[in-house]
Image (tube, grey):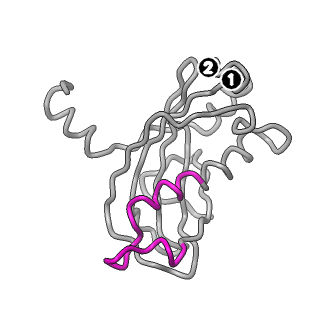
Amino acid sequence: MSSLPEVPAAAGVYPITVRWSDMDAYQHVNNVQYLRLFEEARVYAFKDWFGRDRDLIDEGLLVVSQSIDYLVPMEFAYAPARVAVWCSGVGAASFDLGYAVGGPEGDDTVYARGRVTLVAYDLAGQRPRRLGGAEREALAAVSGEPPVLRGDRALAARGGRA
């Protein structure tokens, strides 16, 4: 699966079906559906990154933040969209993923970019847990620069002040 513009080389790119029911009254993919595209790509990526026998999702993981820039309206296509996902930062118990949603193979338009922050979570103890060494290594192997979103540019224009 070919890469998309401004996506790190380490990113995984996954074909994700856009459903007819994902369309809104304006005949393009509804903004809420991009979160589903992110989620589906993340599930496939985690199997690739963490292996088939053990998955970070099975051990506990919470989404704590999501940001999306909608760049161009995406219309329905019979071929799947391509969703790139990569690690764009790691903390003690959390990590960030970057995303780019592109058109079907042959359409290098990036329709949306986003970032999601996740926290490793101890399901039995009902609390965050620190990422282990193997998890950090797996995330390092698929790391790249975070996608630049509109809010980042606005913050930089104000000198880094919110």
User: What residue is drawn where x is 50% and y is 30%?
Assistant: 89
The image quarter containing residue 87 is: top right
Q: Position of residue 141 (x, y in %)?
A: 65, 35
From this view, report whether residue 127 is shown above or below residue 57: above
Q: What residue type is labelled 1?
A: Asp
Q: What element carries label 1?
A: strand
Point out the stretch of residues depicted in magenta: 19-39
Considering only order in the chain, which callout, 1 or 2, is on the residue closer to the N terminus? 1
Q: What residue type is labelled 2?
A: Arg
From this view, report whether residue 55 is shown above or below residue 107: above
Q: Residue 122 carries which label?
A: 1
From this view, report whether residue 67 is shown above or below residue 28: above
State yes or no: discs 2 and 1 in contact (Cβ < 8 Å).
yes
> Is residue 37 left or right of 51 when viewed as pictured?
left
Q: Where is residue 125 in the image (x, y as percent from the top left)?
A: 69, 18
The image quarter containing residue 127 is: top right
User: What residue is drawn where x is 48% and y is 60%?
Assistant: 4
> Is residue 44 left or right of 112 when viewed as pictured?
right
* Residue at the spot of label 2: 127
* Other-residue count near label 2 (Cα within 10 Å), few / some / many at <14 / 14–19 / ≥20: few
Q: Position of residue 76 (x, y in %)?
A: 46, 79
